[in-house]
Image (tube, rainbow, N blue to C red):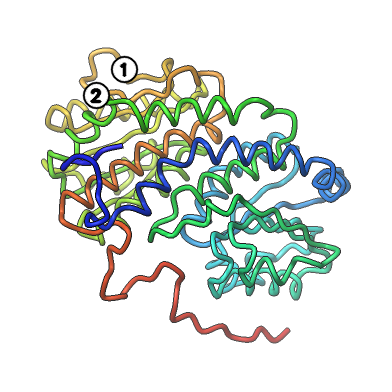
């Protein structure tokens, strides 16, 4: 993987971020083996819960970890045949009675890179306080984090640890996001995703190593866009949110980045467009949903300067004929669900964010050297909930 100035050196301040983007395919294969080796114990814990018709599954986390839940929500609801909601810890901690208003048997799935952010443990504690029956699946990259230690020996909890390398040292979550998302998909989705991780890893390796991809991403960044918009539908709307967050984080907020659904963009957010806006549209693998993604691509390609609109899609989802949109491909993945498609797709956004950061002279491993934004969030005061 290269940058606008060639191969990275330590002086670029990007060594951790580059390594953590590049290591993802190998880690996904390792996560696949890890979940397979834990299958018996996972099924013993999850099976009796998911068999219950009144179970509610809540996917929770903060920031990037919240987007993991949004990517997974629909796919897991379909696989489990149960109600699945993505609720950020930041919402749950601020309004636990509202977020958990229905006192249903609940499986709270917590995503946390470090498990040390104030909301991580607080969300699980509040769920225990508000609900009559709650079980916890903790998916984390840090065995020594508060969240993992708090739930390690609880009978109503199961901690699923990611490979140690997934505990990203860079500022922004990259491999931690994709590993935790994949782990949840495999753990809760069961046999439906057998063999998928290897296919996703193969495509991600191609994205990272292919010179043509590198040139395409570089050319887009060299346009020096002042605004980048990510669009997607369903699971890919969650991916759009995570992609925009990566650009904001790694560029230290110097590039305005936003996200919306393909249909929702016309309802006000479209006002962000100007001559220096780039739009990245994730195209769904679902034939029905894909129509709406392609419609907005065709519309925006006709209104923005040439080269301003890019689609990221498996082969069947490429931009409409004659739309003028460039297409960055995810070859051989036409038949996978969007929640799985999101994993190699996000690598494009990670590379774009990395290159945009370096192009502006920002150090991706530490884009906020003055400390106004922190790798593990600070400044949160937790307040007691009185029933």
Rendered location of residue 278, percent (x, y): 21, 39
Name the element at disc 2.
loop
For the N terminus, the image quarter is: top left
- Label 1 belongs to which residue? 320
1 and 2 marks in contact (CB < 8 Å): yes
Residue shown at 53% from the left, 43% from the top: 71
Left or right: 310 with respect to 203?
left
Q: State whether residue 370 is above or below residue 203.
A: below
Q: Which mark is residue 325?
A: 2
Left or right: 220 with respect to 338?
left
Name the element at disc 1.
loop
- Front residue of 98/87: it is 87
Rendered location of residue 324, percent (x, y): 20, 20
Left or right: 195 with respect to 40?
left
Q: Quadrant of residue 211?
A: top left
Rendered location of residue 245, percent (x, y): 36, 54
Rate crowding at label 1 as few (under 14), some (14 to 19) or many (20 or more) other CA atoms within 10 Å: some
For the C terminus, the image quarter is: bottom right
Q: State whether residue 355 is above or below residue 97.
A: above
Q: CA distance from mark 1 to mark 2?
A: 8 Å
- Front residue of 298/114: it is 114
């Amino acid at each position: 993987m290269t940058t606008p100035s060639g191969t990275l050196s330590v002086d670029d301040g990007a060594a951790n971020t580059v390594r953590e983007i590049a290591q993802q395919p190998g880690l996904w294969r390792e996560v696949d083996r890890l979940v397979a080796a834990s299958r018996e114990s996972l099924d013993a814990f999850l099976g009796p819960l998911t068999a219950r018709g009144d179970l509610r599954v809540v996917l929770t986390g903060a920031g990037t970890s919240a987007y993991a839940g949004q990517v997974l929500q629909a796919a897991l609801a379909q696989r489990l045949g149960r109600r699945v909601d993505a609720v950020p810890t930041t919402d749950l901690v601020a309004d636990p009675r509202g977020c958990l208003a229905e006192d249903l048997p609940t499986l709270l799935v917590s995503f946390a890179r470090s498990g040390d952010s104030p909301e991580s443990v607080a969300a699980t504690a509040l769920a225990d306080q508000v609900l009559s029956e709650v079980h916890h699946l903790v998916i984390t990259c840090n065995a020594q984090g508060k969240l993992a230690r708090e739930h390690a020996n609880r009978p109503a909890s199961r901690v699923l640890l990611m490979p140690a390398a997934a505990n990203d040292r860079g500022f922004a979550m990259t491999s931690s996001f994709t590993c935790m998302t994949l782990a949840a998909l495999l753990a809760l989705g069961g046999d439906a995703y057998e063999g998928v991780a290897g296919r996703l890893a193969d495509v991600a390796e191609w994205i990272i190593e292919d010179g043509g991809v590198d040139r395409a991403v570089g050319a887009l960044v060299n346009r020096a866009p002042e605004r980048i918009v990510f669009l997607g539908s369903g699971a890919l709307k969650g991916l759009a949110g995570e992609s925009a967050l990566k650009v904001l984080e790694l560029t230290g907020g110097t590039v305005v980045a936003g996200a919306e659904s393909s249909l929702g963009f016309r309802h006000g957010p479209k006002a962000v467009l100007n001559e220096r806006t780039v739009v990245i549209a994730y195209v769904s693998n679902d034939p029905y949903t894909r129509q709406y993604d392609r419609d907005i691509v065709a519309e925006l390609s006709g209104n923005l300067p040439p080269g301003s609109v890019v689609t990221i899609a498996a082969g069947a989802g490429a931009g409409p004929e004659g739309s003028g949109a460039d297409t960055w491909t995810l070859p051989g993945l036409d038949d996978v669900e969007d929640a799985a498609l999101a994993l190699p797709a996000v690598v494009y956004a990670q590379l774009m964010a990395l290159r945009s950061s370096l192009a502006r002279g920002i150090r991706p491993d530490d884009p906020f050297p003055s400390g106004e934004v922190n790798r593990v969030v600070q400044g949160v005061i937790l307040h007691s909930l009185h029933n």
